[in-house]
Amino acid sequence: MVLSTLESRRDFYARCASVLNKRAIAALIVFLVICGVALAEGYSIRLDWHTNLRTGPGLHNAVYVIAPAGSVLRVTGSRGKWLEVDRNGKALWLAGWVGFARLDDEQEQTGSVDNCCFLDWPCAGDAEWVRGYYAYRDQLCSHPGFAVYGSQIFVARVRAALDLLQESAPQWYAYADRGLARIKQVSETYGAGVWVHLRTFNVTARHAAAGDEWLASIIVHDACHVHQFEAGQVYYGLEAERKCAQIQLEALAIINPQDSFQFGLPVVLANIDNPDYQWWR
């Protein structure tokens, strides 16, 4: 084709650009449909807990980094129950069921909110949130506390175990406090266990009567499962129980460092791959 005038060339270029733009838009739509990723959501969230950020939308994807409680992340997309977020310029994914609060633009700009320690600090970045975490761990600020339900004897036993935990292992008391909201007495036929969705630990009278040290340690153990759930991790099964039993043993070693037996937990952990030692089956 021969174009004799400047104006006809401009018309030709304009038509070509229009065709290319239409093709580019169509390609983008096809890409979004195939990938199943929504366009940028345009809002920010603040994490309630330390949270796994993964390389892709699913528990099978690797954890790239653990964002501390209080981190503010910009949501840039979603796929199913997973949110794509921007973390220091990198696109990562978090489970949509973990604890977080949605922020409006004004909240995001001011950043003046309580951190994980419930201290009224205007936090600026992860360093401030880490500072708040250690203040919480070392009991330099208040805790939300446990609600305990049951008979008078049951409540007294649970409170004695919590007092022991707070006095001897304050870091694990804080850990349990952040995981569990309530401890509730249930019957032997009902069985002990944790409702991770409700942050409730169900305890039988028999477990409560096993002694302050043991009761304190199983409170830490079941708080571990809540932390796993709220971080988007698998909170049941062999590996989940292995991790929580190890945490329970660490708490027991602080509560009573002179006791090497520790209710047999070292033996259980050494044999936990054996079905005979798998109490949850």
Image (cartoon, rainbow, N blue to C red):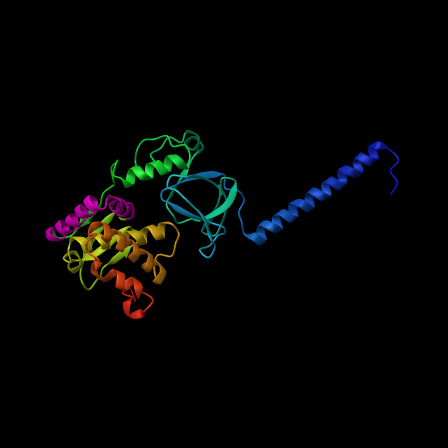
Reply yes or no: does residue 175 show up in magenta: yes
The answer to whether residue 116 of the structure is visible from this angle is no
> Quadrant where the N terminus lies?
top right
Reply yes or no: does residue 267 show up in magenta: no
Q: Position of residue 279 (x, y in %)?
A: 27, 65
Q: Nearer the viewer, residue 36 or 122?
A: 122
Count of numbered circles in the view: 0
Q: Position of residue 35 (x, y in %)?
A: 56, 52
- Residue name at image x 30 percent, y 33 percent: 119
The answer to whether residue 156 of the structure is visible from this angle is yes
Q: Nearer the viewer, residue 98 or 20?
A: 98
Q: Nearer the viewer, residue 205 or 6?
A: 205
Q: Position of residue 128 (x, y in %)?
A: 38, 34
Q: Residue furthest left?
A: 153
- Residue name at image x 23 percent, y 53 percent: 217
When asked about the image quadrant of residue 278, the answer is: bottom left
When asked about the image quadrant of residue 121, the answer is: top left
- Residue name at image x 36 percent, y 60 percent: 239
Q: Is residue 8 left or right of residue 117?
A: right
Residue 48 vs 195, above or below: the answer is above
When asked about the image quadrant of residue 44, the answer is: top left
Residue 279 vs 38, above or below: the answer is below
Q: Position of residue 265 (x, y in %)?
A: 25, 60
Q: Nearer the viewer, residue 133 or 103?
A: 133
> Quadrant where the C terminus lies?
bottom left
Which segment did they paint magenta?
A: 152-179
| Main secondary structure found in the magenta portion | helix
